Structure formats: C-alpha cells, structure tokens
Image (cartoon, helix red, strand yellow):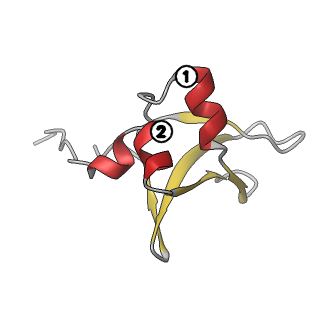
Amino acid sequence: MGRKVQRIWPKHLQTVGEMLRQNVDVFAHCPKCQTDFEVDLETLAILYTGHYSLIGRHGKCKRRGCGGRVFFNARIHTVFVPLLEEK
C-alpha cells in the first residue's frame, strides 16, 4: 500500500535534446484556464541544456492574469502523452 510506481519513459521523451532529435511536439497545458501553449524545445535546450527533462515538471501559465501552473504533454503520432510522474 502507498508504494510509488516508477514509470519507464521511452528514450525519445526523456530529455529535451532527444525530443528535438526525434521531432517530438510538446505543448504546455494549464488546467486552470484550459489553455495550451506550444513549447519551444530549442530555447529550452539553450537555457537548460539538452539533458533537461520535462517529465514531472510544471511551469507558470503564460496567459496574462491566470496564475495557473502548466504541465507538459508530448505528441506521439496523434495522441498527447502527459509528461507526469505517476504516484
């Protein structure tokens, strides 16, 4: 009971650099205002290095006045996969 399950992520989703190499589309979603934003992986690779991971990360919503927290989704074919840690 209460055991944390560790998800094994495919290599092409583990780092920003790998997502860039595999042309993975990434979007940030804010549950508060229901807005989706395209994520610029090239900028993230420059700012945080290509080894940076979006798995389990959250950021501030870019929509003016929202104040929500976004989580990241990767598009694989036609399906969006939330980059969240499982509990």
Who is closer to the viewer here, 4 or 46?
46
- The foreground one among 64 and 45 is 45
Check disc 2 and report its element: helix, strand or loop: helix
Query: Can the viewer see residue 72 in this picture?
Result: yes
| Dot 1 amino acid type | Tyr
Picture coordinates of residue 16 (x, y %)?
47, 39
Measuring 10% from the left and 42% from the top, which residue is drawn there?
1
Residue type, label 2: Val
Q: Evaluate if marks 1 and 2 touch, with contact meaning CB atoms under 8 Å apart.
A: yes
Instruction: Give the Cα distance between marks 1 and 2.
Output: 9 Å
For this orientation, the residue located farthest to the front is 21
Expressed as whole percent of the image width and height from the top left, the position of residue 76 reads 43, 67
Give the residue at x 19% y 42%: 6
Instruction: Identify whether 79 is placed above or below 13.
Output: below
Residue 42 location, quadrant: top right
Residue behind mark 2: 16
Whole-percent x, y for residue 36 in the image: 70, 57
Front-most of residues 67 and 74: 74
Question: Residue drawn 89% across and 39% down?
Answer: 65
Q: What mark, if any, has residue 48 been given in the picture?
A: 1
The reply, left or right, for residue 54 in relation to residue 87 is: right
Where's the C terminus, which quadrant? top left
Side of 33 where 54 appears, left or right: left
- Residue 25 position, x and y percent, is 56, 58
